Image (cartoon, grey):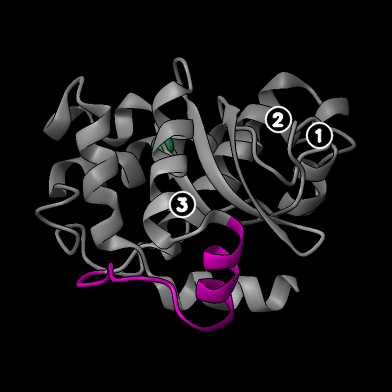
Amino acid sequence: MAFTLPPLPYAPDALEPHIDTKTMEIHHGKHHQAYVDNLNKAVTGTSNEGKSLEELVQKAGTISPVVRNNGGGHWNHSFFWVSLAAGAGGAPKGKLAESIAAEFGSFDALKEKLAQAAISRFGSGWAWLVEQDGKLIISSTPNQDNPLMDVADVKGTPLLGVDVWEHAYYLKYQNRRADYLAAFWNVINWDTINKRYEEAL
Ligand code: MN3
């Protein structure tokens, strides 16, 4: 079965003013759609046809770059949209909040570390909060790689990912990646992130 673009779980203007409508429309409707289309094109008629997205992502090191990049792009963006919500923000709760306090000292310290990973990622990529064997780790990946991939420096269960490709922020923030990252905390769906953490443990 061919891969398909999941609908946005909210209207394209729902994350205003932090993430603008035009960026959401192009990011979801054009960029994510292109990853889906290119992935379908690349696997059709090959031994990878019919494999699940998770299967492809997990063996990223042994598949063609076009499947790795577009499969990663499809996985990462599907994960990204549902990590965000209108009127969200706030702070993590429960078990996740306790673990963040224990491992990073405070939520502010975690924010700083994630922003640092996102800002220092040269070129295009993602910064991540990852659960690995019960521990929380901040990492970043180039291009459309992610922590589920066999090629990732830090492997584990992704809890939160920040897209730091320019297409994610350029229309509103231009070269100000740090401003985009500061605004990003206002739209995080912590209910979803908390749930991912509990499932990962
Ligand atoms: Mn993107």
The residue lying at 48 percent from left, 23 percent from top is: 121
Crowd around label 1: few <14 · some 14–19 · many ≥20 (10 Å): few
The residue lying at 43 percent from left, 62 percent from top is: 83
Mark 3 or mark 2: whose residue is earlier in sequence: 2
Q: Does the residue labelled 3 lie within 8 Å of ligand 1?
A: no
* Mark pair 2, 1: CA separation: 17 Å
- Is residue 120 left or right of 67 when viewed as pictured? left
Residue 180 location, quadrant: top left
Residue 120: x and y in percent read 45, 22
Task: Say what amino acid the circle numbered 2 marks.
Answer: Arg
36 or 181, which is in the foreground? 181
Check residue 68 in the rendering and tell me which mark sits there, or answer none.
2
Check residue 45 in the rendering and tell me which mark sits there, or answer none.
1
Q: Which residue is most to the bottom?
A: 94
Total numbered labels placed on residues in the image = 3
Quadrant of the rendering where the N terminus is positioned: bottom right
